Image (cartoon, helix red, strand yellow):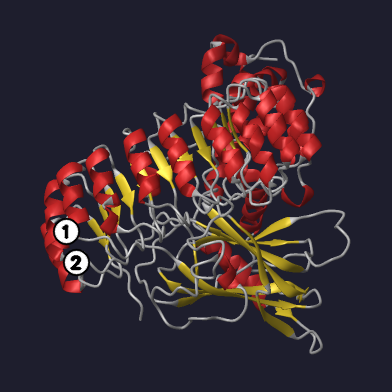
């Protein structure tokens, strides 16, 4: 055989991959036309009437703006009939996620993105809702009341959360997906995407969110599920369906939501080995590795099945130093982890966020994987991984001695005693405990032994009894701390702020949003401004006592300030804000929503004089 033929085979395969990828990234409008064709030819018997139902309850979500102990701005507002719609504006009775835009990505606390993230996975948040009856979905309507356009993917699950017996198999199916797009209007709308039909009934719907293009927080009021009790029958009039669209959908399902390729064990013994490998024999090993580094994980698994040479390259542990498994949360399971083990012995960054829920990953499966692949880990992302228990954290503390970055955000099912094991990870530099049940004793132990911490998130940790004690320990032990999130900590006072300001002079980011026990009259905010000159982000959200004196202290001492949120204060005037904007040349975000002295005219004046600053002012209709 000529040496050209193996090379042509490989090139043909790459060309095929490029065509499939191009099809996947094409606009979704043509596919929607196909789906409309299917739906328009659906006929139902008179007895199979459409069922219309609002969400019964919210069973899981990744973040929310509200408190764990109230209903204002929480995901739980999505259950039941609308509270606000069709009104537009900022209402506490809606569901609001924690972030919007790209502001959080520009902060000192932002983490570097993972390589090899598929381009069709752009979800940042999610919420899962259950409904009373299982139906074959015909429509999903989302009532958006403020800054719509964040929903980018809707999925349905085959499992019935109300069934007394666990299902033999759990499947997730994409009903609709779209790349993030900007909606120019901020008014309320009823979002009615054209969904595809699925072959199982469901009463569990998942919305995935990307808020990166939004000007402000999106607010959702309710979700309506339309469907049939019995499976609809397609008529024979389907000749207008484009088969290319159907094939593209199949491709997206496999790569966007699944890892079927990882659930099959590949053996090099069955692969062809010719007398030579064409021009690949002339390329340095490192150059081939560099080329393959641009493939997504499913593509890498496909390529491993072509020949022994590429199988060897695709299974090289150097290809898996950064491993992002979050995009494949819907099908990643113990089998996937088992087949990845041999390839991941050198993995340093591992993202398992959103994975393993509903029995997909077991404690035993996770433990086996870390015992083989955990020794080199320096970064471990486990946000919303509800399979975690105390045993898992114990294994992490034993198998990952060099771990520097641990994210347990919204792991709200972890028992409080599990967090004691984190204190063994003495090399930690970043720890995210947002919306967890960490208790004061465990946290004090962590702070005592993890003195290298630079980034710490304790937002919405409702089990902590005395935040002043925590702040005192942070000030005493965490001298290198650069960012601190105390969002909605319920009882920190000026004493805790004094300990932080004196003990952590390197702080660049501080979130004290919705901390009701802080009062400007004690001088706590002025002290922060004077003792933390490196501040780039300061959130004093919903603190009614912030006044002109505080703003003027920031203007004098914190000239590096980039983001400031003083939503809800009644005591800040236009004059002090003008001083702030004149002094802080790098300021790019200023939120003055519901500041009673700052009306629309004042915002327009400031925006005209300081055009580089995005000044936010929310409203209620």
The N terminus appears in which quarter of the rendering? top right
Q: Which percent across, then down, holds residue 145?
A: 45, 75
Q: Earlier in the sequence, mark 1 or mark 2?
A: 1
Q: Which percent across, then down, holds residue 501?
A: 32, 40
In the rendered image, the vertical position of residue 497 relative to residue 621, given as above or below: above
Q: Which percent across, then down, holds residue 503?
A: 36, 34
- Residue under label 1, please give it: 577
Q: Nearer the viewer, residue 402 or 197?
A: 402
Outermost residue to the bottom: 46
Residue 294 makes an appearance in the image: no
Residue 209 makes an appearance in the image: yes
Q: Nearer the viewer, residue 73 or 26?
A: 73
Q: Residue at x 57, y 12 (%)?
A: 285
Image quarter for residue 542? bottom left
Task: Give the distance between the C-alpha atoms of the residues marked 1 and 2, in whole angstroms.
Answer: 10 Å
Q: Answer few, some or many: residues within 10 Å of disc 2's Cα (few below 14, many 20 plus, some between 14 and 19).
A: some
In the rendered image, the vertical position of residue 16 relative to residue 607, given as above or below: above
The C terminus appears in which quarter of the rendering? bottom left
SS under mark 2 = helix
Q: Is residue 11 left or right of residue 389?
A: left
Q: Residue at x 46, y 77 (%)?
A: 189
Q: Answer few, some or many: residues within 10 Å of disc 1's Cα (few below 14, many 20 plus, some between 14 and 19).
A: many
Res. 603 mark: 2
Q: Is residue 580 left or right of residue 453?
A: left
Q: Is residue 337 left or right of residue 475?
A: right
Res. 261 mark: none
């Amino acid at each position: 055989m000529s040496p050209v033929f193996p090379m042509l085979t490989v090139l043909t395969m790459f060309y095929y991959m490029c065509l499939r990828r191009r099809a996947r990234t094409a606009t979704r409008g043509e596919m929607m036309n196909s789906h409309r064709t299917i739906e328009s030819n659906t006929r139902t018997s008179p007895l199979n009437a459409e069922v219309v139902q609002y969400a019964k309850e919210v069973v899981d979500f990744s973040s929310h703006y509200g408190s764990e102990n109230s209903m204002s701005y929480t995901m739980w507002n999505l259950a039941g009939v609308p509270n606000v719609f069709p009104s537009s504006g900022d209402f506490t009775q809606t569901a609001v996620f924690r972030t919007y835009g790209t502001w959080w990505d520009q902060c000192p606390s932002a983490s570097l993105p993972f390589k090899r993230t598929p381009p069709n996975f752009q979800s940042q948040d999610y919420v899962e809702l259950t409904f009373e009856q299982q139906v074959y979905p015909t429509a999903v309507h989302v009532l958006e009341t403020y800054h719509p356009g964040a929903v980018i993917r809707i999925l349905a699950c085959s499992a019935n959360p109300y069934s007394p017996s666990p299902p033999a198999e759990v499947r997730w199916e994409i009903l609709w997906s779209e790349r993030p797009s900007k909606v120019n209007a901020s008014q309320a709308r009823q979002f009615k995407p054209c969904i595809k039909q699925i072959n199982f009934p469901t009463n569990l719907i998942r919305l995935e969110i990307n808020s990166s293009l939004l000007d402000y927080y999106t607010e959702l009021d309710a979700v309506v599920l339309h469907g049939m009790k019995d499976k609809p029958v397609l008529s024979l009039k389907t000749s207008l369906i484009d088969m290319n669209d159907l094939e593209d959908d199949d491709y997206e399902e496999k790569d966007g939501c699944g890892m079927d390729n990882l659930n099959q064990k590949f053996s090099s013994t069955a692969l062809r080995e010719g007398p030579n490998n064409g021009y690949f024999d002339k390329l340095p090993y490192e150059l081939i590795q560099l080329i393959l580094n641009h493939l997504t994980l499913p593509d890498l698994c496909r390529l491993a099945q072509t020949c022994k040479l590429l199988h060897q390259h695709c299974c090289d542990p150097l290809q898996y130093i950064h491993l992002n498994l979050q995009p494949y949360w819907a099908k990643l399971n113990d089998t996937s982890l088992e087949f990845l083990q041999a390839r991941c012995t050198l993995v340093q960054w591992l993202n398992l966020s959103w994975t393993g829920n509903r029995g997909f990953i077991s404690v035993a499966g996770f433990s086996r994987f870390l015992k083989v692949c955990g020794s080199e880990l320096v970064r471990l992302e486990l946000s919303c991984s509800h399979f975690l228990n105390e045993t898992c954290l114990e294994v992490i503390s034993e198998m990952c001695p060099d771990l520097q970055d641990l994210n347990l955000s919204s792991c709200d099912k972890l028992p409080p005693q599990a967090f004691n094991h984190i204190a063994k990870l003495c090399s930690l530099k970043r720890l995210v405990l947002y919306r967890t049940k960490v208790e004061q004793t465990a946290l004090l132990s962590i702070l005592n032994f993890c003195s290298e911490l630079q980034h710490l998130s304790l937002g919405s940790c409702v089990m902590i009894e005395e935040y002043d004690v925590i702040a005192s320990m942070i000030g005493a032990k965490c001298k290198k701390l650069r960012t601190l999130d105390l969002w909605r900590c319920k009882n920190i006072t000026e004493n805790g702020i004094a300990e932080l300001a004196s003990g952590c002079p390197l702080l660049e980011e501080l979130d004290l949003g919705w901390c009701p026990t802080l009062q400007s009259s004690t001088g706590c905010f002025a002290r922060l401004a004077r003792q933390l000159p490196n501040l780039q982000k300061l959130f004093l959200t919903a603190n009614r006592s912030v006044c002109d004196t505080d703003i003027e202290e920031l203007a004098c001492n914190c000239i590096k300030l980039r983001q400031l949120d003083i939503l809800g204060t009644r005591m800040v005037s236009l004059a002090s804000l003008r001083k702030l904007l004149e002094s802080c040349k790098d300021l790019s975000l200023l939120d003055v929503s519901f500041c009673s002295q700052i009306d629309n005219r004042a915002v327009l004046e400031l925006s005209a004089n300081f055009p580089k600053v995005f000044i936010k002012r929310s409203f209620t209709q």
